[in-house]
Image (cartoon, coloured by chain):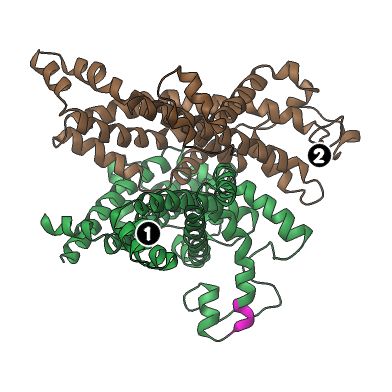
Chain colours: A brown, B green
């Protein structure tokens, strides 16, 4: 059986890669993620019609169904959907990376502080604000923030960041509250270590594997929420290619020109699937190390 | 059992959180670059109209004062006027909210029912082809955004096979039932209008399934793993060794403790469901509060944006309270902990 998850647990020794590669699904995830990253980086060289990524009109080739010349067909302006999908990986990945780069340091620091100073005003303040941000589905507030600002990729990233940090705060808070009672933390405190040292040198390293796993999974989810914003026109603006807006534009021409929206839609699925599988693989890897 | 105290504390906390949310939303609404009144009325509005709106929103006062005025009018039942529909926002909410509630209710039911069913199925046949098949579908289903599911369902079942209608809540030739609750399925049952009931049900199918799919597989995965975990426990082996039929073991002994994590995660899945409703309602032309929400957002209709988010925040909070109550009912330990406090 290809999908037996038990198999991977048998190997206790060996290199990380060996363990990781025991689960074929994790390898599939890694391959998808590498494919997305490299095709985004090399888009001008791997796509057949790089000019189609932006402003380009050729009505003679409009709405062609998928063929050898146009793998995913062409859109209403005669642009190659495959080329645009690959180019759209770029803004998707930028979205994921920038949002996590903003959100993780903020969320993790707040979680460490609140967890370490549990049952003080710091804990109450941070965690109550966290609860407020978690009290409404993130997409809804992100939509609202982007809509009142100018709709573009930067503001979309900002809006998603505003909604995303509480997840890291809550995650790290739980770990920090239990870790602060561990002997190694207490002995560091007894030796007179500074609060900064205790938080970032003693507690944080023990949270890293969980944080890293969540980050991998979140890459997919942030890209998805970014695609949702661009679907309603609140992300990357035309003529630049973005997966969500491509799906939305194509939806107007269903069912005749289905390829215009279905292929970018499947591309979003592929990215999220890739990061989910990779995240599961990384999580298995860490839980095996602890076992 | 001190259930009322549990509930009172839960409600009290929710009210605190909602007040916090209203502050956050209010600040967001005032973040409009430039003059919010000008942004709302558009470049062609007269200066007089803009000044009037500025005055009405107290835009010349400090943010705190503006918030105080706003919250006061909210408690007087005045949510402002929508610039999109030119009606009081409260009227819009009354008109559009039931459609979204109906949609969310049905996709929540799909999510829970099929999720638990698939979960039991893969736990019962763990590590067979059935389990593996469900697992593969789960990976794909969880990763597919609701709006992409919606487009595929629209194409296949709405347009190619034309099994289900793709637009709105009722067919044009069907008389809508008298409005009682606003949920067409419920109203048509109450008035005995079966034609409308089945027509409304058909209209619900595609959008409700699009919204349910991701969460459904999430529920299935969680039900599966908690079923398998519980089935290793002694009391289950004991039941089996007494010769109790497998079906009874599963549904009588394993089911209740095993769906606790499934139910708790339902609250989270509702978050993505309600967020995704914004896109799915757009695709199916569903006259709900989410479609209205998108339209007012694109129009920078400040009062309406605040109202929509607050109403959805309240709905989401209520759903989570209901989820907590169900979990407390299912898990006696949680009730006992509350009593111990």
* Picture residue at 79% right of the left edge, 37% below the top: A75
State the CA–CA distance, disc 1 to disc 2.
43 Å
Q: How many labels does the image show?
A: 2
Tag 2, which chain? A
Q: Residue beneath label 1, please?
A: B319
Q: Residue furthest right?
A: A60
Image spot of residue B98 (x, y percent): 49, 67
Dot 1: element: helix
Circle 2 packing at 10 Å, graded few (<14), some (14-19), many (20+), is some
Q: Are marks 1 and 2 on the same chain?
A: no
Which x, y percent locates residue B129?
59, 48
The magenta segment is B193-197
Residue B338: give x, y in percent of width and height: 16, 57
Q: Is the magenta stretch mostly helix, strand or loop?
A: helix
Residue picked out by circle 2? A76
Q: Are marks 1 and 2 in contact (CB under 8 Å)?
A: no
Instruction: Name the chain under label 1.
Output: B
Query: Looking at the picture, does residue B302 appear above or below residue B333?
Result: above
Q: Is mark 2 on a helix, strand or loop?
A: loop
Quadrant (top left, top right, bottom left, bottom right) of the C terminus of chain B? bottom left
């Amino acid at each position: 059986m290809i999908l037996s998850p038990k198999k991977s647990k048998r190997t206790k020794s060996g290199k990380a890669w060996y363990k990781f590669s025991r689960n074929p699904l994790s390898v599939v995830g890694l391959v998808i993620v590498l494919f997305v990253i490299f095709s985004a980086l090399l888009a001008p060289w791997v796509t057949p019609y790089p000019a189609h990524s932006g402003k380009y009109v050729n009505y003679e080739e409009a709405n062609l169904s998928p063929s050898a010349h146009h793998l995913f067909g062409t859109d209403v302006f005669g642009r190659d959907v495959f080329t645009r999908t690959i180019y759209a990986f770029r803004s998707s990945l930028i979205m994921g990376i920038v949002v996590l780069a903003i959100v993780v340091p903020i969320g993790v620091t707040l979680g460490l502080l609140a967890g370490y100073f549990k049952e003080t005003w710091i804990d109450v303040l941070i965690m109550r604000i966290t609860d407020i941000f978690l009290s409404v589905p993130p997409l809804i507030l992100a939509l609202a923030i982007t809509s009142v600002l100018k709709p573009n990729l930067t503001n979309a990233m900002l809006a998603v960041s505003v909604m995303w940090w509480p997840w890291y705060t809550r995650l790290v808070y739980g770990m920090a509250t239990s870790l602060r009672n561990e002997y190694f933390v207490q002995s560091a405190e007894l030796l007179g270590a500074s609060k900064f040292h205790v938080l970032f040198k003693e507690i944080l390293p023990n949270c890293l594997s969980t944080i890293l796993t969540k980050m991998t999974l979140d890459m997919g989810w942030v890209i998805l929420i970014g695609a949702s914003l661009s679907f309603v026109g609140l992300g990357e603006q035309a003529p630049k290619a973005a997966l969500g807006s491509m799906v939305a534009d194509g939806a107007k021409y269903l069912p005749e020109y289905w390829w215009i929206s279905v292929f970018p839609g499947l591309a979003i699925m592929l990215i999220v699937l890739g990061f989910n599988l990779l995240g599961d693989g990384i999580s298995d890897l860490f839980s095996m190390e602890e076992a | 059992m001190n259930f009322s105290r549990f509930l009172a504390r839960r409600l009290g906390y929710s009210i605190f959180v909602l007040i916090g949310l209203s502050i956050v939303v209010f600040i967001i609404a005032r973040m409009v670059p430039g003059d919010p009144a000008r942004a709302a009325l558009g470049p062609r509005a007269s200066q007089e109209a803009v000044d009037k709106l500025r005055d009405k929103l107290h835009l010349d006062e400090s943010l705190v004062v503006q918030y105080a005025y706003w919250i006061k009018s909210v408690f007087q039942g005045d949510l402002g006027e929508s610039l999109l529909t030119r009606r009081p926002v409260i009227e819009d909410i009354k008109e559009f909210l039931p459609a979204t509630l109906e949609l969310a209710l049905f996709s929540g039911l799909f999510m829970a029912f099929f999720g638990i069913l698939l979960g039991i199925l893969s736990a019962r046949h763990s590590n067979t082809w059935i389990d593996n098949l469900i697992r593969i579908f789960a990976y794909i289903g969880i990763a597919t955004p609701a709006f992409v599911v919606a487009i595929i369902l629209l194409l296949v079942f709405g347009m190619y096979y034309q099994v289900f209608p793709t637009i709105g809540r009722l067919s044009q030739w069907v008389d809508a039932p008298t409005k009682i609750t606003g949920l067409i399925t419920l109203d048509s049952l109450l008035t005995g209008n079966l034609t409308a009931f089945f027509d409304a049900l058909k209209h619900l199918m595609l959008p409700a399934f699009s919204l349910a799919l991701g969460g459904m597989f999430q529920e299935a995965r969680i039900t599966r793993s908690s079923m398998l975990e519980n089935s290793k426990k002694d009391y289950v082996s004991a039941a089996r060794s007494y010769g109790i039929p497998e079906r009874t073991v599963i549904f009588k002994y394993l089911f209740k403790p095993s769906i606790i994590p499934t139910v708790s995660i339902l609250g989270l899945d509702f978050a993505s469901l309600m967020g995704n409703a914004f896109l799915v309602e757009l695709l199916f032309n569903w006259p709900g509060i989410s479609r209205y929400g998108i339209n007012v957002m694109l129009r920078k209709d400040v009062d309406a944006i605040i109202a929509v988010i607050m109403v959805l925040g309240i709905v989401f909070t209520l759903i989570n309270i209901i989820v907590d109550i169900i979990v407390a009912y299912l898990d006696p330990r949680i009730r006992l902990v509350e009593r111990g406090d």
